[in-house]
Amino acid sequence: MGTPAFAVPPLRRLLDAGHQVSAVITQPDRPVGRGQKVQITPVKELALERHLPVLQPAKLKGQGFDKVLSIYNPDVIVVAAYGRILPPEILSLPRLGCLNIHASILPKYRGAAPIQWAIINGERTTGVTIMQMNEGLDTGNIVSFEQVEILDDDDTHSITNMLSIMGGELLVNTLARIERTGLVESVPQNDADASYAPIMSKTDGLLNWELTNEEIICRIKGLQPWPGAFSFLHGRAWKFIKAEPFADSTGLIGQETDERGRELNLVDPGAVVLLLKGKGFVVKTGDGFLLVTGVQPPDKKPMEALDAMNGKLIRKGDEFISDPEFLTGSREKL
């Protein structure tokens, strides 16, 4: 049972390891994009390539879907980012239970967006857990886990790819152990150490320039690819893709005026204080300055900050706004 790209490597690894996958359950096909073209899920795409039966129930509870699944008489149901809560009648159906591949080291970051929130919160390690599912939200016993370091150049995209592959390998190793012993050995989670990673919303992407450099950089990395880290300039949303701390060791940032003699705002967080030739533009933050090197201006594709500067899309003295009221009234498609 799985839906997005994260669930594809585990399914492929199961098949390559020789396990009999009797059926694949994924979310219904849905229209996407401006053209609202119906698109199949990544998991369904792989299942069709491998000629596997695909089931796409609109609902799991109270529709008799457990009776459909019982026909397959599963030993185990593997769940990877399926996107729905399993009702008790499905949880109890397989002989060995339901195993979930969760993208964190439980009990930390239970919930829908563990990778994003781990990066946003500045964690230096994360991992993947194979969990025996119960009726709680990622509260079941831990069967196995593997940890990985979050590197400076990692973002949500790179960690998601890494953990999906790692999760598939860990799953196959775990199933091999279960086959050898005939048991699903597990240990309870320590609820006292639990933290939560709620599903991301568009408002989570709004940058607060009063945060520190490190906090803003973590948000930029963790919010890729959606909703993206964004802020408003002249009432329109800019997305921020790459940034790094900037030390004004040469005293380039000072009190200045524009071509009309008006004093520029180079003090408040969010102010563009410097256009740095060959690198990008510098924005004031809560504890210093941030060199922005990758952006997506409104109605443009992602670009190097230098290209935005060369195109006169950004000027010294501009001020990015982090007021949530701009988001409420904006028609920007983020």
Image (tube, rainbow, N blue to C red):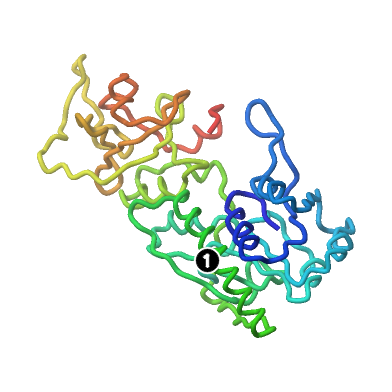
The vertical placement of 170 against 267, above or below, is below
The vertical placement of 179 against 302, above or below, is below
Residue closest to the far top = 260
**144 and 304: which is toward the camera:** 144
The vertical placement of 154 against 182, above or below, is above
**Residue 58 pos. (x, y %):** 80, 48
What residue is disc 1 on?
Answer: 128
The vertical placement of 83 against 298, above or below, is below
**Residue 332 pos. (x, y %):** 53, 28
Q: Secondary structure at mark 1?
A: strand
Instruction: Tell me if mark 1 has few (under 14), some (14-19) or many (20+) residues whose alpha carbon lies within 10 angstroms of its own.
Output: many
Q: Quadrant of the N terminus?
A: bottom right
* Residue at screen point 57% across, 45% down: 201
Which amino acid type is shown beneath numbered disc 1? Val
Q: Is residue 90 left or right of residue 184?
A: right
**Residue 86 pos. (x, y %):** 75, 62
Residue closest to the far left = 250
Residue 260 picture quarter: top left
Residue 244 picture quarter: top left
**Residue 281 pos. (x, y %):** 27, 33
Q: Is residue 304 left or right of residue 129?
A: left
* Residue at screen point 44% across, 27% down: 301
Residue 183 picture quarter: bottom right
Count the marks.
Answer: 1
Q: Is residue 170 left or right of residue 138?
A: left
